Image: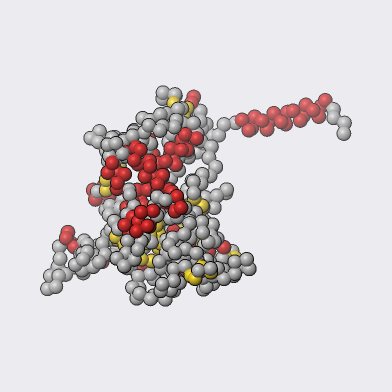
Amino acid sequence: MITTKKSISTLIAIASVFLMAGCKKDQSPTTGWEYNQPKNGGFEVVPYEEQETGPGLILIEGGTFAMGRTEQEVQYDWDNIPRRVTVSSFYMDETEVRNLDWLEYLYWLRRVFGTDFLEVYKKALPDTLVWRDKLAYNEPLVELYLRHPAYREYPVVGVSWLQATDYCAWRTDRVNEYIMIREGILRVDPSQSNENNFNTEAYLAGQYEGMVKNDLYDLDPSGTGTRKVRMEDGILLPKYRLPTEAEWEFAALGLIGNAIYERVLDRRLYPWNGHILRTDKDKDLGDFVANFKRGRGDNMGVAGALNDAADIPGPVYSYWPNDYGLYNMAGNVAEWVMDVYRPLSGEDVSDFNPFRGNVFKTKTLDDEGNIEEKDTLGRINWRNVTTVESAGRRNYRQADNINYLDGDFTSTITTDWFGQPKDSANISGDMYNYSITSMLNDKVRVYKGGSWNDRAYYLVAGTKRYLDERLSTDYIGFRCAMTRVGSPIGGK
């Protein structure tokens, strides 16, 4: 091929046009002003692709499914009416939280708060006495299950709903702190203590004064030249939290591996197809696919041919994952979810991201309207929104919506035994007057799934049970979730 000087000049000119087009700064399609330009005010738009997947998490692509009972109602509670709902995409832990994870948590609490606020550490200690049985010898588990290295990969138990929620908050801060260190914004600070520890909310409120390495360059010409990380930068992750009941059930079923386009081939009972609890794979033919109690007195089978090879909870990576890649969504330990229990929630909750338990809050402000100083543990203070602040709203009128449509004034008998109208100011909670008219209250939380100590019925994803949020057992653990922001499937 012969190339002339004229053709070379033409190619250079074309390349220059493309280069200039690539260097052109982004402009607002509504105002025409350039983004990221200090000369015109410095409104900043950072490059962003997709949400980073946090440590230990797996993306659960959301969708519609039939939530609720798929098996017979053996307890006759009729509290799990099947209903079609939609769940947004979210992230969930691949496994249950391990003993090793909880020991890391305890170590951090003791290192940071142990000198002046030892009660914070003590509050987080699991109740190892849950292993005791009046007519069984389980003392070795009381002494060893949490701390012995042989059990480090086993799921933590003896943890209340409140403790699990505190762990999620702690994990949020530690992951975001690690990301900030990785991005060169913060320095590693092993000397953190008391209120001088990294807290995501305190940092965003401008109240973190730890070991900053490099702040971000500020394009605002009236600023100081540097600024703190903002949520708009996309660097910090959303909060770790417990999954909702709908999210947990949707993730457990794993219908993504059981559908062709919009046709679900088989409505699953378990995280796998079929109605049996053994694998049909040639290599492991006949092996149990979950850790549960096959029958009275049979926790693991016969010596030499153990059916699930686990008399108590097994390691979190035992058995086969479901189609999302989640382990032990049936068996091993049951798991806490966020929801407050109500028998008729299935009739009341929304069909998009259903959940009962909302108590809307806002940051506490000082007399000048600024965010109140953080507390002695380095956390921002929150309070319930008031009815005055909610006045004029159509979507909610008060902070506490736990009883909405099931326990509040609109759903309670409004007359007394003599037919006289009750005072609406005192009627809230009448339906769930704990230990007098009901064994339920606003502190009773749902837990899902079966455990090592349950029969096969509780392995069904649609079953649910409940327990006071302050209590714990030897068969309930948990795993964390995180909200997915942006595209539900990513990359589009």
Q: Does the rendering let one see residue 232?
A: no
Q: Does the rendering let one see residue 258?
A: yes
Q: Which of 90 and 104 is in front in this view?
A: 104
> Which residue is at 52% across, 66% downward?
289
Image coordinates of residue 305 in percent, x first then y, are: 53, 69
Q: Which of 372 and 105 is in front in this view?
A: 105
> Which residue is at 57% across, 71% downward?
286
Tell me if 461 is positioned left or right of 129 in this view. right
Query: Up-down: is 62 above or below 304?
Result: above
Image coordinates of residue 257 in percent, x first then y, are: 57, 63
How many labels sit on residues?
Answer: 0
Q: Which of 236 and 4 is in front in this view?
A: 236
> Which residue is at 53% across, 61% downward?
319
Image coordinates of residue 207 in percent, x first then y, are: 34, 33
Q: How is the image coloured?
A: secondary structure
Image coordinates of residue 439 in percent, x first then y, are: 25, 66
Q: Which of 12 and 94 is in front in this view?
A: 94
> Which residue is at 50% across, 38% downward?
30
Query: Up-down: is 404 above or below 371?
Result: below
Q: Quadrant of residue 311?
A: bottom left
* Figure quadrant of the N terminus: top right
Tell me if 374 is positioned left or right of 204 in this view. left
